[in-house]
Amino acid sequence: MLKRTLVAALVLVTATLFGWSATSHGANPRKTIIVIVSEQRLIALEGYTIVHEFDVVTGRPGKETTHGKYTIFAKHEDYTSKTYNVEMPFTMFFSKDGKAIHGTSWATLRSYVHTYVTESVGSHGCVGLTDEDAATLFKWAPVGTAVVVLTEEEGE
């Protein structure tokens, strides 16, 4: 698990890189999802406060989860992939090429194997969570929530 100080530093760096503030319109804290590919972690923020942290599984080589700043533009509680014919509960689409945050089988084990054993165990580019974690995030994040994917490319 990431230490709080490291997470705070990542949040500030992300804010600087992508030019956003902790508040959105009015005085409401901005909701932001940060996916840290190298750690296989997802952090959900309201302003600069961490409200959720989850293990995730991201794209394997050749099907990478691409770094950048995105926005959730569509949500489906029950969704089946048209490309892979796989159920994707609590789907939140964030990229025009079909990448989404969603529930998936064996997410925690796949996250561990992807991080510590081999990157060949991963997704097709989506961000997979356990169904329970995906349901929690789905309820918390409205359409329009910012999604920031950090990969090692930022450090190059």
Image: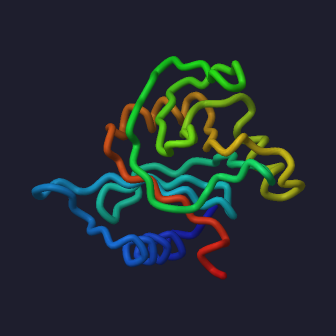
Residue 153 vertical placement versus 119 (above, below): below
- Please identify the quarter of the rendering in which residue 154 is found: bottom right
Quarter holding the C terminus? Answer: bottom right
- Viewer-proximal residue among 55 and 68: 68
Q: Position of residue 134 (x, y in %)?
A: 53, 34
Residue found 73% across the figure and 41% down from its top: 123
- Please identify the quarter of the rendering in which residue 115 is found: bottom right
83 vs 120, left or right, is left
- Please identify the quarter of the rendering in which residue 6 is found: bottom right
Residue 63 vertical placement versus 143 (above, below): below
Residue found 89% across the figure and 55% down from its top: 117
Q: Position of residue 81 (x, y in %)?
A: 63, 23
Quarter holding the N terminus? Answer: bottom right
Query: Which residue is the extreme one toward the front?
Result: 97
Residue 44 vertical placement versus 11 (above, below): above
Q: Position of residue 41 (x, y in %)?
A: 61, 55
- Viewer-proximal residue among 105 and 144: 144
Q: Position of residue 57 (x, y in %)?
A: 69, 46
Query: Which residue is the extreme one toward the left?
Result: 26
3 vs 147, left or right, is right
Residue found 49% across the figure and 55% down from its top: 43
Residue 62 vertical placement versus 4 (above, below): above
Query: Which residue is the extreme one toward the bottom?
Result: 156
Residue found 62% across the figure and 34% down from its top: 130
